[in-house]
Structures are given as C-alpha cells and as structure tokens.
Image (cartoon, helix red, strand yellow):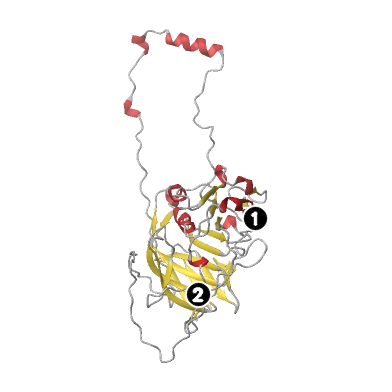
C-alpha cells in the first residue's frame, strides 16, 4: 500500500547548540593540537548511492472460455486509419441519428477515487458523467470520475494521480482533483489545459474534507462544487463524450454480460438489466456508500499497452500508453460493437473507428471506460 501523505517537513534540519555550556565545550575541543586531533576522513566506509534496480512485473493472462484473443500486436500511431472494405448487407441498416450531448457543460472536473479494498465503498461514482478505471499498482485499480455539471458535495476517497489520468483530463479541460502525484504528472498539468487541484499541497483545500470514519489515507474527500470557479478559466474541449451521441447499430452482437479480468486478478462483471449495466467487482456487487450498485448506460473497453516502473519499490506503478491506437469495444443497450481507438497527440481527442474506418459516436448516457492492459481478458455473453 502506498502512503500518499507528505513527509514531515521537519526532518533533517540542522541541530544548533542551545546553551552556553555547549558553546564552551566546543571551544575546549577546538583547543586541541591540530596535529594530534585532526585526522583524514575514512572514505572506505562512505556509502555509495546505488540506483534501485528496475522492477519488472511478469503478468500471466488468466484464461477464460470463449475469450477475445489476447495476442494483440504492439500499438502503433495511426495517422491514417486502414480501411478494409466489407460486403454490403442485402438489407441496409439504417444509420442512427446523432443526438446532442444531454449535459449542460460549463467545465469538467475530474476526481481521483481509490479502489483499494480499504477505500470501499466509494462515494460519487454514480453521479459522474464519465468514469475511467485503470491500473495503479499491484492488482489495484483507481477511478477517475469526471463531472460535467452538478458535481456532488462529497466525492472520494481521494488518492494520488498518475500521468495517464492527467493525460485523460487533457481531453476534457477543467481541473483534476487529487492528493499528491508521481513524476510526469506536473509536466502535463503545467501546460495550463487542466487546473491542478492537489489537495495535499494546498490547491483546492477549501473543498477538502477529512472524515473520522476511516483511517488515513482513505479518509480524504472533496466538495467538488466549491472548486468550480477555477474551472471557468479552462473551458471544455473536444472529447468524444462532449460531442453528439448516437445509439449503436441494431445489427450488432448481443452483450448481456461482460466479464473483464485485469492481468493480476482484479475481476469486473457488467450485467445488462434492460435499462442499464450493473457492476460487480472481485466477486460482489460494486456498491457505493449509500448502498446503490454502480451502474452505467454505456461501457467502453479500451485495450492499451502498460509498462511497469520502479517507483514505490515493488509496488511499481504502471504507465499506460494512451497516445497511439489499439482495439476496443463499445457496449450499450445490451449490444456490443468492436472498434479501434486512436489518439494521435495530447492536443487531440480519442476517436473510435469501426471496421470501415468511420468514426463511431459514443452512445447516449453515462459512459464507463475500462482501460485494460493487452494481456487482460474479456468474455462476452450474448
């Protein structure tokens, strides 16, 4: 477990003599003959700074019956998506009519929410317009909940962020709420597209809430409504979720249940109820603190290459390649559509392309992104 609490700023301060007796004693010592008292320092015992060894995680895919093949090629940037002609159906499918995004978007605010077992149940996931789940370290994941309007008065518990979560927010603008970070995050946030609400360094602390119900670091929450004034300086951008939406074609494959297994065992199951998808994780319904089950109208599975790092020792948080392209799947209304996601640079949004290379609009409603390493598994039941 990673301790996100900042270190005591009082460590390693110089100790000063505080009494006249200490001062006299120092003068007496200095009166010794230089020839007899002085000696050369012993360099043989001086420790040498040895860089920590790089930690590599060996991930073994978990086989599931009827799974999507896991042998995916390495991600490459696709300036021009390949277009593979497909046979024309004898009965043409009517193209869905795009509908405007049903959000009164002034600015977006993203909040880092922990998914450690000690952090469950969380608060604020069902109130979010968009949620991303991505690996953090060990077999743990974290959430980025993005609110376009009516952010709730309490969201959390909040933990540190990673560069790839900050990179996601560059698609939306607004601000990112978190507690501390790791190398790479400041470089992204200092570009000015996303406001850096680091609650543990004083930015946005007017909205920070510490509860007595849990031990640190699982007791930090935020009243996101109190931070909205800063967001107006960073207007919304052109993320797919902020563009017009459209239902999936009716001739797509059925998807009544989707099982997603992350490489080190974290298991997620989404079940279609006829109105929405309900979420379970690690063998139990995923409930919020108010007892409601986490749900979403649409799910996007986005496969991405991940790399282990040596930060935090053996925990070794992973990096996730979100600039590039890879296979994906969009699920809504009990159906699924294979796609390929593509993002060419930080200044451009992620787009989703069908087998003909045409851009696919996201379905209406709330969207939950499952960003899955390439060696994870997905099983779909029609």
Crowd rating for badge 1 (residues with CA inside 10 Å; few <14, some 14–19, many 20+) = some
The residue at 51%/9% (across/down) is: 24
- Can you tell which quarter of the image residue 88 is in? bottom left
Residue at the image position 51 percent from the left and 67 percent from the top: 241
The answer to whether one can see residue 62 in this image is no
194 w.r.t. 253: above or below: above
* 54, above or below 352, in the image: above
Give the answer, above or below, for where 147 lies relative to 259.
above
Q: Disc 1 designates what residue?
A: 154
Query: Can residue 134 be seen here?
Result: yes
* Residue 169 tag number: none
In the picture as drawn, the residue positioned furthest to the bottom comes out as 90
Tell me the distance, in whole angstroms, between the alpha carbons under discs 1 and 2. 29 Å
Expressed as whole percent of the image width and height from the top left, the position of residue 256 reads 53, 79
Total numbered badges shown on the rendered structure: 2
Mark 2, Cα crowd under 10 Å, few <14 / some 14-19 / many 20+, is: many
| Residue 148 location (% of width, % of height) | 58, 61
Label 1 element class: loop
Label 2 sits on residue: 331
In this view of the protein, which residue sits in the foreground, 258 or 241? 241
Determine which quarter of the picture holds residue 356: bottom left
N-term-proximal mark, 1 vs 2: 1
Depth check, front residue: 316 or 191 = 191
Give the image location of residue 143, x and y in percent. 53, 59
**Which residue is drawn at the image coordinates 53% and 46% (left, top)?**
4
SS for tag 2? Answer: strand
- Callouts 1 and 2 close, C-beta under 8 Å: no
Residue 103 position in % (x across, y down): 59, 66
Decide: is 16 above or below 156.
above
């Amino acid at each position: 477990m990673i301790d996100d609490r900042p270190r005591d700023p009082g460590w390693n301060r110089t100790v000063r003599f505080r009494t006249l007796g200490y001062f006299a004693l120092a003068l007496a010592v200095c009166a010794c003959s230089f020839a007899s008292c002085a000696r050369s320092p012993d360099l043989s015992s001086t420790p040498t700074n040895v860089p920590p060894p790089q930690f590599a995680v060996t991930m073994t895919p978990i086989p599931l019956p009827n799974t999507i093949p896991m042998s995916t090629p390495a991600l490459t940037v696709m300036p021009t998506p390949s277009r593979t002609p497909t046979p024309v159906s004898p009965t043409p499918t009517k193209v869905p009519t795009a509908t405007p995004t049903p959000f009164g978007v002034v600015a977006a605010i993203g909040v880092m929410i922990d998914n450690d077992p000690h952090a469950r149940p969380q608060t604020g996931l069902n109130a979010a317009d968009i949620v991303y789940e991505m690996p953090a370290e060990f077999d743990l994941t974290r959430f980025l909940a993005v609110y376009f309007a009516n952010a709730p008065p309490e969201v959390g518990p909040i933990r540190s962020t990673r560069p790839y979560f900050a990179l996601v927010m560059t698609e939306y603008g607004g601000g990112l709420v978190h507690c501390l970070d790791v190398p790479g995050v400041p470089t992204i946030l200092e570009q000015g597209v996303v406001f850096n609400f680091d609650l543990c360094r004083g930015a946005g602390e007017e909205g920070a809430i510490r509860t007595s119900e849990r031990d640190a670091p699982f007791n930090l929450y935020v009243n996101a409504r109190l931070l909205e004034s800063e967001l107006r300086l960073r207007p919304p951008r052109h993320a797919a979720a902020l563009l017009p939406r459209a239902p999936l074609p009716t001739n797509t494959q059925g998807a009544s249940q989707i099982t997603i297994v992350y490489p080190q065992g974290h298991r997620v199951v989404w079940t279609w109820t006829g109105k929405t998808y309900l979420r379970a994780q690690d063998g139990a319904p995923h409930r919020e603190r108010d007892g409601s089950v986490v749900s979403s109208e649409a799910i996007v599975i986005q496969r991405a290459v991940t790399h282990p790092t040596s930060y935090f020792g053996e925990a070794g948080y992973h990096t996730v390649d979100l600039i590039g392209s890879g296979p994906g799947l969009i699920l809504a209304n009990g159906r699924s559509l294979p796609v390929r996601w593509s993002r060419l640079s930080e200044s451009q949004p992620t787009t989703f392309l069908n087998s003909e290379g045409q851009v696919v609009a996201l379905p209406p409603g709330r969207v939950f992104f499952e960003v899955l390493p390439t060696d994870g598994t997905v099983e779909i039941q029609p």
